Amino acid sequence: MAARLNTIYGQKDYIVLYDFMSPVAVFRSIHEPVLELRTAGVTEMILTDLVPGGPQKSTTDAALINDVIATLTGSAPVRASASVKKYGLYLSGGKLIGMKYCAGLYIDGAGQVYLARDTFTDKWNRSSDAFSKWTK
């Protein structure tokens, strides 16, 4: 199958690369600054299992969203156990119109919740108690 490039509704400086049915990557204009989560105006979070059809929950609680953004942008990364359950945490709204930012969410065997700026990095941040409670 051939890949295709599409524009993103509401985002004049971004395009998305699709394979057959799924987005593969998002590209931004070199004239557009890197997305800064602290000023993106995120208004919704969706927690989802990385396996299609898995559990999902969402919130528009501004305090909880701000807590997550503070964890992702301001806390010191830690090393966690290699034995974890992986989830996606999608952030949307504000400057992300037409797009979702996917942060990594990991829960170890002891129930400790970690957040990461993406789903590929091994630099995780320990989440707050309030967010950990929300995930369960």
Image (cartoon, rainbow, N blue to C red):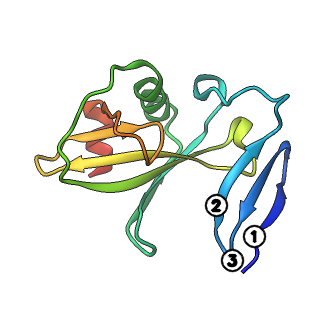
- Which residue is pictured at 16% across the width and 47% down the height? 111
Q: Which residue is mark 1?
A: 3
- The tag earlier along the polypeptide, 1 or 3, is 1
Residue 63, given in percent of the width and then of the height, sits at 46, 29
* Residue 24: mark: 2
The one nearer the camera, 19 or 112, is 19
Does the CB distance between marks 2 and 1 fall below 8 Å? yes
Circle 3 SS class: loop
Q: Which residue is mark 3?
A: 20
As drawn, which residue projects farthest toward the front? 2
Circle 2 SS class: strand
Dividing the picture into quadrants, the one containing residue 19 is bottom right
Q: Which label lies toward us, 1 or 3? A: 1
Identified by mark 2, the residue type is Val
- Which residue is pictured at 10% across the width and 46% down the height? 110
As drawn, which residue projects farthest toward the right? 12
- Which residue is pictured at 66% across the width and 63% down the height? 23
Residue 40, given in percent of the width and then of the height, sits at 66, 30
As drawn, which residue projects farthest toward the left? 110
In the figure, 115 relative to 22: above or below? above
Q: Is residue 25 left or right of residue 130?
A: right
- The tag earlier along the polypeptide, 2 or 1, is 1
Counting every numbered tag in the picture gives 3
In the figure, 91 relative to 23: above or below? above
